[in-house]
Image (cartoon, grey):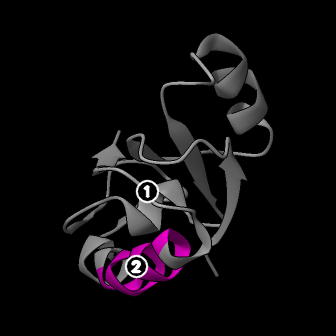
C-alpha cells in the first residue's frame, strides 16, 4: 500500500511528488527551498515490482515484476486525494521514476 508524507505548506506553489524509501524524504527536503514548493514523498511501493513496465528476469532474486500500470493507477487515485489536503496547491509535478 502506497502512503505519503507531505513536506511544506506554502499556498500556490508547485507540488512535487517523488518516490522515496524510508527517510529519503527528510534528506531531500533538507536540500530544497522550503518556501518555493511542497514535496510529497510516496512510500510503500516495491521498486522492482511497481516501477518496471514489463516483467524481466534480470536477477536471481527480486526480478522486475512489471506492475507499473497498476502503480500508476494507484497514483491516479492517490494524487487528487493528496491535493485536496493542501491549501491552494500550485501545479502538480511527478518527479523521478
Which residue is under mark 2? 80
At 54% from the left and 41% from the top, the residue drawn is: 38
At 39% from the left and 87% from the top, the residue drawn is: 77
User: Which percent across, then down, holds residue 41?
Assistant: 60, 50
Q: 72 or 46, which lies in front? A: 72
Which residue is under mark 1? 89
What separation in Å lies between label 2 and label 1 (alpha carbons)? 11 Å
2 horizontally vs 11: left or right: right
Q: 48 or 13, which lies in front? A: 13
Quick check: is 44 in the magenta stretch? no
At 29% from the left and 70% from the top, the residue drawn is: 68
Give the secondary structure at mark 2: helix
Give the secondary structure at mark 1: loop
Point out which mark residue 16 bears.
none
47 horizontally vs 56: left or right: right
Chain-order first, disc 2 or disc 1: 2
Q: Which residues are magenta?
A: 73-83
Amino acid at each position: 500500500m502506497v502512503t505519503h508524507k507531505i513536506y511544506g505548506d506554502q499556498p500556490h506553489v508547485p507540488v512535487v511528488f517523488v518516490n522515496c524509501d524510508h527517510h529519503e524524504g527528510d534528506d531531500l527536503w533538507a536540500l530544497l527551498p522550503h518556501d518555493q514548493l511542497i514535496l510529497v514523498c510516496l512510500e510503500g511501493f516495491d521498486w522492482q515490482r511497481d516501477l518496471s513496465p514489463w516483467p524481466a528476469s534480470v536477477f536471481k532474486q527480486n526480478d522486475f515484476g512489471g506492475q507499473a500500470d497498476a502503480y500508476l493507477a494507484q497514483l491516479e487515485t492517490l494524487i487528487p486525494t493528496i491535493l485536496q489536503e493542501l491549501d491552494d496547491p500550485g501545479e502538480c509535478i511527478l518527479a523521478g521514476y
